[in-house]
Image (cartoon, rainbow, N blue to C red):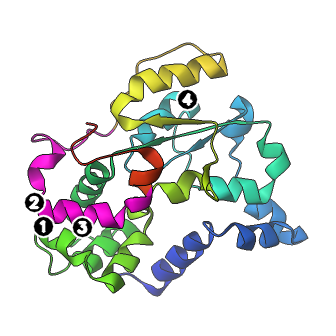
């Protein structure tokens, strides 16, 4: 079960996606430095990577920045220093929503019953009584359960990570499905040598993601991630 501190941390994280809230906090002198979302590695490259969970971001972060860069939405950088952000090359990667959801589910289902990390405790609480992917997706038809799931980083719609209003905020939006080609373009933009991306975390095995969805499940997920489908042009069956 999630601890009270876990729940507070999730609530605070949720605030990052509300630009006006972070803009106000960033203007408070004694909070300004603590609110700075820019990692030293971003300043060194003059590039900001918006790492959307479950979109192969760990490989990107390792190759370009030498390790983990955290999960921070574009809106947080914009709220902190919108003018300075224009001096950085900003980029992110998105993934087919059906494929991403299945990948996220597999990650959490594998740690149910563990308690070492907040992810483990979240999984143990939120996946209790849902023995398989079908039961989990069916539960997303419940509005209250859906809201709780979508507040957690790995399940948030990808639009919330990279959109500013109705527009994509980042300068370059790559795709999981063409990750190496798009990564090469980013290397060219940054003026660095192209390298083959490391396979830090293998995607799910056992066939194409479409094999685990019934038509009803596909419709539910299409409704849950309607924004991503519209904003990024994905369809069920497209992509990886």
Residue 195: x and y in percent read 46, 16
Q: Which of marks 1 and 4 is in front?
A: 1
Give the mark nearest the N terminus, 3 or 2.
Answer: 2
Q: Name the residue under label 3.
A: 220
Q: Nearer the viewer, mark 4 or mark 2?
A: 2
> Regarding mark 4 in the picture, which secondary structure is present there?
helix
Instruction: Name the residue located 36 percent from the left edge and 73 percent from the top edge.
Output: 149
Q: Residue 214, labelled with which disc?
A: 2
Whether 183 is among the magenta residues is no
Q: Quadrant of the N terminus?
A: bottom left
Q: Name the residue under label 1.
A: 134
Side of 33 relative to 120 (left or right): right
Q: How far apart are marks 4 and 2 (CA)?
A: 38 Å
Indicate whether 193 appears above or below 59. Answer: above
Give the mark nearest the N terminus, 3 or 1.
Answer: 1
> Regarding mark 1 in the picture, which secondary structure is present there?
helix
Seen from the viewer's position, the closer of residues 178 and 8 is 178
Instruction: Name the residue located 47 percent from the left edge and 87 percent from the top edge.
Output: 4
Residue 176: x and y in percent read 38, 37
Side of 191 relative to 14 (left or right): right
Indicate whether 140 appears above or below 163. Answer: below
Give the mark nearest the N terminus, 3 or 4.
Answer: 4
Give the mark nearest the N terminus, 1 or 4.
Answer: 4
Does the CB distance between marks 2 and 1 fall below 8 Å? yes
Q: What stretch is highlighted in magenta?
A: 201-227
Q: Residues within 10 Å of mark 1 (few under 14, many from 20)?
A: some
Does the CB distance between marks 3 and 4 fall below 8 Å? no
Q: Distance between the residues labelled 1 and 4?
A: 37 Å
Q: Name the residue under label 4.
A: 64
Q: Distance between the residues labelled 3 and 2?
A: 10 Å
| Residue situated furthest top in the rendering | 193
Residue 233: x and y in percent read 40, 44
């Amino acid at each position: 079960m999630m601890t009270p501190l876990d729940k507070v941390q999730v609530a605070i994280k949720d605030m990052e996606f509300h630009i006006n809230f972070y803009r106000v906090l960033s203007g408070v002198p004694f909070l300004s430095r603590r609110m700075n979302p820019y990692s030293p590695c971003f300043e060194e490259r003059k590039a900001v990577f918006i790492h959307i969970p479950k979109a192969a971001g760990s490989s990107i972060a390792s190759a370009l920045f030498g390790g983990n860069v955290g999960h921070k939405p574009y809106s947080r950088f914009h709220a902190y220093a919108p003018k300075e952000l224009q001096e950085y090359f900003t980029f992110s990667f998105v993934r087919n929503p059906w494929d991403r959801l299945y990948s996220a589910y597999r990650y959490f289902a594998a740690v149910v019953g563990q308690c070492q990390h907040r992810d483990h405790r979240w999984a143990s609480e939120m996946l209790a009584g849902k023995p398989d992917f079908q039961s989990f997706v069916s539960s997303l038809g419940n509005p209250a359960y859906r809201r709780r799931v979508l507040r957690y980083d790995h399940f948030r719609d990808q639009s919330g990570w990279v959109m500013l209003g109705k527009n994509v905020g980042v300068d370059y939006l790559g795709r999981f499905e063409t990750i190496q080609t798009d990564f090469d373009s980013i290397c060219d933009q940054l003026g660095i040598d192209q390298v083959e991306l490391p396979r830090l975390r293998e995607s799910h095995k056992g066939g194409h993601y479409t094999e685990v969805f019934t038509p009803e499940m596909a419709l539910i997920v299409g409704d849950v991630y309607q924004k991503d489908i519209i904003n990024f042009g994905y369809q069920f069956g497209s992509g990886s």
